[in-house]
Image: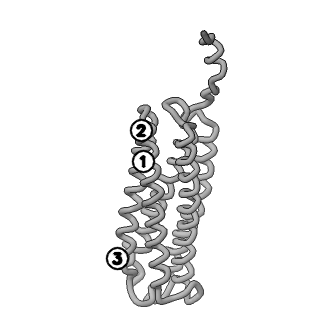
Amino acid sequence: MPDPRMSLRRELPVGSVGRLSSGWWAMWCVLATEGSLFAYLLFSYFYIGSQAHPPWIDGGPPKMHLAIPGTILLLAASGTAWWGERGIMQGRPGQLRLGLAATVLLGCIFLGLQAKEWHDKPFGLAKDSYSSLFYTVTGFHMVHVVIGLLMLVALLAWSFLGYFDQRRHSALSIGALYWHFVTAVWVAVFGSLYIGPHLGLFT
């Protein structure tokens, strides 16, 4: 009969968990840096827009027939990521996998909508200051979405390999934190670049 003490010795150490994890604080440092980047970009948008002669946006405020569904999808993706994380904390790995898979799917659809909007724009990157800022801000956000999706795909693969359980899930929590940041940034971008002009800013 196997010695239970030997099986305990073969278990992997739990290590730091949640907010005690060094990776958790490292991710917050990354998010502070990236948040500053988007703050500068949005500041540039508002500053140059306030100095520009009307009309700031050629052709009027941007259409929101793709941006609104994209926003709903990204908010839903943040919800499914949270739901999946809660699942593994409660010992339900199937919920984790389903939540991560749904988050990846919704994130990919969001990217598709953004690519469609870029394709349909009547102006290019170098047309004027507004077009340059629009593509730069939304482009940087799309890059962050892609990075977040790569993280989620890796986490999904690890979940199928059984890397996470009720005690070992710090990597998952860190990845989910990054994804929530991506969603929060988009809300700020959506409010600035889409809703703001419809409220009469710079027009």
- The vertical placement of 127 against 67, above or below, is below
Q: Which residue position holds label 3?
A: 65
Image point (50%, 48%), residue name: 176
Mark 2 and mark 1: span between their CA atoms?
10 Å
3 vs 2, front mark: 2
Secondary element under disc 3, as helix, strand or loop, is loop
Instruction: Choose the circle earlier in sequence order: 1 or 3.
Output: 3
Report the front residue among 178 and 163: 163
Q: Do tag 1 and tag 3 residues touch (Cβ < 8 Å)? A: no
Q: Which residue position holds label 1?
A: 98
Which amino acid type is marked by label 3?
His
Image point (52%, 29%), residue name: 167
Mark 1 and mark 3: span between their CA atoms?
29 Å
Image point (48%, 68%), residue name: 111
Compared across the picture, whether 18 is left or right of 184 comes to right
Q: Quadrant of the C terminus?
A: bottom left
Residue 87 got which mark?
A: 2
Which amino acid type is marked by label 1?
Leu
Image point (39%, 65%), residue name: 71
